[in-house]
Amino acid sequence: MSETWTVKRCLDWTNEYLGGKGIEKPRVSAEWMLSSILGLSRTQLYMSFDRPLLPEELDRMHRSVVRRAKGEPLQYITGDTQFRIIDVACEPGVLIPRPETEMLVEEVLAFIDRDVFGEADGASRRERAALPWNAEVEAARRAEEAAAAEKARQDAAESEDDGPKPDGDGLPEDRPDDDVDGSEGESDAKGSEPRCARILEVGCGTGCISLSFAAERPGRVRCIATDIEPRAVALACRNRDALGIGAEVVDFREGNLVSPLDRQTEWGTFDVLVSNPPYIPTSVMKQLPQEVAAYEPELALEGGEDGLDIFRRLVNAAPSMVRPGGLLACELHETALDAAADICRQAGFENVRIVSDLAGRPRIILAAVPEAAVLAARERFARRA
């Protein structure tokens, strides 16, 4: 008679087996896979050590262990992962969400809370998601803002003899978002509806970024998110449906970068252009762990020689996509942030800021798109018309 496989025995055997195959943190892999198969949390798993596994559960666990031993990512094996306060399905062919991207979402939320909704509107916002690094992010942001303010003061002092600069001419009367956005940080003229932030995401993958905005600021955001990969768009739509978020709130579209957007009605209407684009430099691609290189889509990873091929196209597109004062926010490779900041400044963007991840590596670029850049973009397209 065969020996009974309990939860504890299964965990212990899997931990030893995967460790022998060179899998990092084999115990975590064992717990994650068995929790998914049994429908239990890790806490519940530890309270069920003596529970025997049914034959079909043991069979599923065996197949999962075989896949994991070959190096396949856990998220593809279990079929899901947690991202901030939501759970999203994952599947081969679509990039797996990373913790670094959770910080990208945090930075964009901070911007729309402050610059779109306005401080006075804070009472109507949802409570900030309770994440372990909130205090670190806030402290870093305040330090960076203080440094930026001091630099601005010094620059103003050095240039005070230059005289005032002439005022701009204002926006053209046929600006497509004149009747879409409303006034910045305010309700409409009647005060009946709160201001909604409009966000454009390029490269949606699982949809985790835009869906997080919708989940954490319910009723306050409208997102359009694009991806060139049909499997990504289909998966993002399924994740949206599973979370009960409407297509009118987060609209996923298939297409290259901003090509799915309507030039007449959607260009220039966004408060934010956010992206986690392919950003791994070509030379670094050869050094990626097998778990990434052999299983995750190269299309979503490689960013060209310096990792900035797609980023440059986003910088070029941003002045046509966002309103004056709108934000460009991108996650990039740690070696590329200084070059990315230079690209933004050369494009005329302002308040360029680099944010480090929890490991202290440069990870996120933030830049404001000023009115001058927006007007210059419109002039270029007008000349081509």
Image: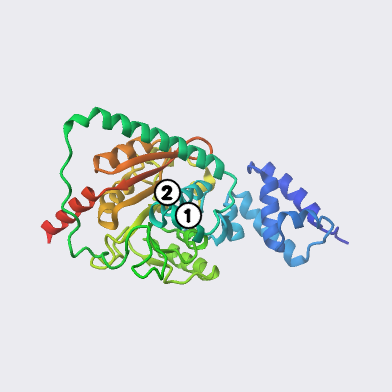
Disc 2 on helix, strand or loop? Answer: loop
Query: Looking at numbered disc 2 in the image, what kind of residue is underneath it?
Result: Leu
- Foreground of the two, 81 or 93: 81
Judge from the rendering whether residue 374 lies leftward or rightward of residue 33; answer left or right. left
Judge from the rendering whether residue 233 lies leftward or rightward of residue 154; answer left or right. right
Where residue 55 appears, x then y in whole percent? 77, 66
- Foreground of the two, 210 or 76: 210
Where residue 299 appears, x then y in whole percent? 39, 53
Query: Looking at numbered disc 1 in the image, what kind of residue is underneath it?
Result: Leu
Residue 92 visible in rendering: no
The alpha-carbon separation of the residues under discs 1 and 2 comes to 8 Å
Question: Which tag, 1 or 2, sits closer to the chain's start?
Answer: 1
Where residue 321 appears, x then y in whole percent? 28, 57
- Going 72% across and 54% down the picture, which residue do you hit? 42
Q: Which residue matches tag 1?
A: 95
Where residue 376 appears, x then y in whole percent? 18, 51
- Going 45% across and 67% down the picture, which residue do you hit? 234
